[in-house]
Image (spheres, rainbow, N blue to C red):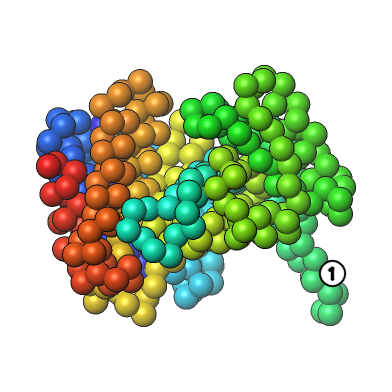
Amino acid sequence: MKLLILPCDGIGPEIVDATVDVLRAVNDARALGLEFEHQDIGFASLEKYGTAMRPEILDMARTAGGVILGPHDNVNYPPPEEGGVNVSAVFRKQLDLYANARPARTRPGVAAGKEGMDLVIMRELTEGFYADRNLHLGSGEFMPTPDTAMSMRKITVTGCERIARRGFELAMRRRKKLTAVHKANVLKVTDGLYLDTVRHVAKDFPEVELDDVLIDAMAAYLVRDPARFDVVLTTNMYGDILSDLASELSGSLGLAGSTMASDTICVAQCQHGSAPDIAGEDKANPAAMILSAAMLLQWLGGRHGREDLHAAGSAIDAALDAALADPASRTADLGGTLGTKAFGAKMAELVTG
């Protein structure tokens, strides 16, 4: 099975290299049959090809088993007409990556983490308020007059139903509780449609306890008592905001793994950005990228009925717990002394030990 490796920008090459070291180690130890194909994307692609993302990258992603996508710095890209396309937006829209799983769990030895926190935010990724990807053609954000700006929100039954099913399926594998986040008291039509659709899907999962919480209250509850939540189902923007909050509450955004999936393709991409200020300095914590890769292996295991891939992903997750439990094997942002490369090497050692 081939994995497409796309390091991208800033700290991306460093944390992706550390992640591939871990994947190679677990591949060799467990004879998983993984192969790795590296391609340029982001600034490296702009320099070589005049575009941040060549069209053939999407074709490679469609035929690969899975994709490892590093963080990108699209804010500093040139305009789209000069090749500066938003890499993540292109992936999500063109590959229909609608299901964004973002776990937040308290890890051993990470003192900043909220006690007992273990949840997954299941975020819809293709519609909502995200104007660069919620329309078939054109942008959902526009200015009808020079002094007026407007943004459209798109919510569909299809979009709500499929993300709700992924959320309930995940809850069935966990603690069988799902919380639907909304603002239907104000956004009566769009969030009303979302909430009605979630309740309809819930009838197919009678074993899962369903509740719903307003978005503003949800932010407060995450701070006060995050241990009460299991699977948190959200539309696009709510999930983007809440997942950063949840990850920081669990200990650090540097531990924030993430996958983006369609029904047939999965892309591992950590939640945090490209941190260009520390790029090339061997300071970045690669844990989030490594965890994202572990989630990808688990997804592939479920998709292809391969318990060995799922077990390998779980082994990487367990190795991360072991690394963080020991102050000597943490990166500097978590009170340790290891650099990016050394942390990757330590993880590779632990996952094969």
Q: Label 1 is placed on what type of residue?
A: Pro
Quadrant including the N terminus: top left
Q: Residue at coordinates 39% horizontally, 26% vertically from top-left?
A: 302
Q: Position of residue 281 (x, y in %)?
A: 24, 76
Q: Is residue 348 left or right of residue 207?
A: left
Q: Which residue is mark 1?
A: 144
Q: Residue at coordinates 77% horizontally, 38% vertically from top-left?
A: 195
Quadrant hosting residue 67: top left
Quadrant hosting residue 303: top left
Whether residue 323 is visible: yes
The answer to which of 203 and 296 lies nearer the viewer is 203
For label 1, the crowd category at 10 Å Cα-Cα, with few meaning under 14, some 14 to 19 and many 20 or more, is few
Residue that extends furthest to the front in the rendered view of this protein: 115
Q: Position of residue 191 (x, y in %)?
A: 79, 46
Quadrant including the C terminus: top left
Q: Position of residue 152 (x, y in %)?
A: 77, 57
Q: Is residue 233 above or below residue 310?
A: below
Whether residue 93 is visible: no
Q: Is residue 261 above or below residue 92?
A: above
Q: Indicate the secondary structure of the residue bearing disc 1.
A: strand
The answer to which of 351 and 23 lies nearer the viewer is 351
